[in-house]
Image: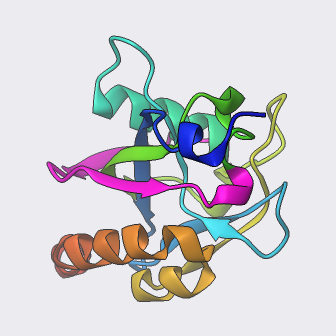
Amino acid sequence: MKAIEELKKLPYRQCVGIVLFNRLGHVFVGERLDHKGAWQMPQGGIDNGETIEHAAMRELKEETGTDKAEIVYVSDTVLTYELPDHLLGKLWGGRYKGQEQRWVALKFLGEDKDITLYDRVHPEFSSWKWVPLPAVCDLIVPFKRETYQSVVDEFRPVLEKYRDRN
């Protein structure tokens, strides 16, 4: 195992995060299958040559089982978080120290029954729910909270605009 100092020199993983709004203006969060009590919004790596928008739609489908959504906002802000020392070298094949994320807001066009967490080979979530956007930060593991607070702050006006149209 590499020393922590060496692992902290690794690059960030390029990632997209997804804020999926339902008709009531609540957002999707999933409880991680590998960590009971840890919730997050869908997110995942951006493949080489893939646009942020394409990555968001692909990750949405992979993690929720549905692509019944439309993109309503793409953030220009790049957010980062670093893994805590006990996770360094263990996630993503040990190649990254954390994630560099761009976040995308999507309007959910389907029904709750369209969300199927177990229709794929490697499910990410064990359960899911809709929550008010500000409540997301209380559910997230501590090392991601600052990033999620930035997402909440930036996406609050998007949610307000979204609510005004429904």
Front residue (pair 92, 87): 87
Q: Is residue 102 visible?
A: yes
Q: Is residue 124 above or below residue 23?
A: above
- What residue is drawn where x is 85% and y is 70%? 36
Front residue (pair 93, 33): 93
Q: Is residue 143 above or below residue 58?
A: below
Q: Position of residue 79 (x, y in %)?
A: 30, 55
Q: Position of residue 130 (x, y in %)?
A: 58, 76
Left or right: 111 in relation to 12: right
Left or right: 44 in relation to 166: right
Left or right: 166 in relation to 63: left
Front residue (pair 16, 4): 4
Q: Quadrant of residue 23?
A: bottom left
Q: Is residue 40 above or below residue 89?
A: below
Q: Is residue 4 magenta?
A: no
- Outermost residue toward the top? 49
Quadrant position of the C terminus in the picture:
bottom left
Q: Position of residue 17 (x, y in %)?
A: 42, 50
Region rendered in magenta = 66-87
- What residue is drawn where x is 17% and y is 80%? 164
- What residue is drawn where x is 59% and y is 64%? 40
